[in-house]
Image: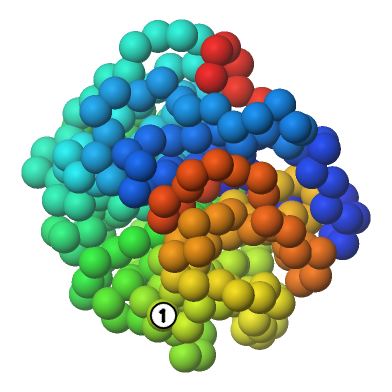
Amino acid sequence: MGPADAASAGDVRPQSRPPLYVSDYGNNRVVRLPSDSSGQRTVPLDGLVRPTGLAWDGAGDLYVSDTGNNRVVKLPPRGGDQSTVPTTDLSRPLGLAADAVGNLYIADSFNDRVVKVPADGSGQTTVPTTGLLHPWGLALAPDGDLYISDFVNDRIVRVSAHGSGQTTVPTVGLSQPTGLALNAAGDLFISDSGNNRVVRVSAGSGRQRTVPVTGLSDPLGLALDCHGGLYVADGFNNRVVRVRETGGGQVTLPSTGLNTPTGLAFPPTGGRPGRY
């Protein structure tokens, strides 16, 4: 998920953003929504069943949680074939996150854990956590700390990258949190799906606010662009909406035939190389 930088916080300029990738859960596909009027495209992926989480690594590889097949697939940037990420015993994988060196994190929901697949191929490990029940969304902070939406427990946990353990992010009234996103200031955005809203937790003060978005029904994945735009997969309304991080300027992105859009992600460097 591309972080929002210091460019004019109230200025959402869709014409200058990269394409947005959307996991179209009910149609078993991933689609690409361009910022111009060139039209929606389906990403060439085979055999997906109920895809959810999306993530990119720094090399431009796209990762997709192929939830119905209990696997994660990887699509290289320049026309290569998709492959299955080597994992063990996943059960309903959902959210994904990739760090700067290519380590992949997977919310292994029905196993109540998050697993890490190291970039060096050394094999899957389990991230040390306590008490997770159906983890859903993931977000990585610049310092390597990992945020996890703990769906059944109605909370967000933060796992330190430096060995100091797990903490619960102070929030009020969450119900079935799903998608997560972090901006460059460290503010955390949370899809509070059970309350049909998105909340923002400020990095400095910890203050929680509801982002003014109207008409949401089961908000799921989130993404941020580099111009202060927040994107919400509005699951039961079969649409993706864009607002300013601070609220206002809400629009529905042009799309065709979405059925429960679930995951959202921008390419890491402003555009995907190759044919996709």
The residue lying toward the viewer, choosing from 33 and 150, is: 33
Q: Specify how the rendered protein is coloured.
A: rainbow
Residue 192 on image: x %, y %? 48, 76
Residue 151 in sight from this viewpoint: yes
The residue lying toward the viewer, choosing from 138 and 130, is: 138
The residue lying toward the viewer, choosing from 111 and 119, is: 111
Relative to residue 131, is residue 118 depicted above or below? above
Residue 5 on image: x %, y %? 77, 50
> Which residue carries the number 1 mark?
194
Looking at the rendered structure, the kind of residue marked 1 is Gly
70 relative to 24 in the view: left or right: left
Residue 109 on image: x %, y %? 23, 59
Of helix, strand and loop, which one carries label 1?
helix
Relative to residue 273, is residue 39 depicted above or below? below
The residue located at (81%, 64%) in the rendering is: 249
Q: Quadrant of residue 197?
A: bottom right
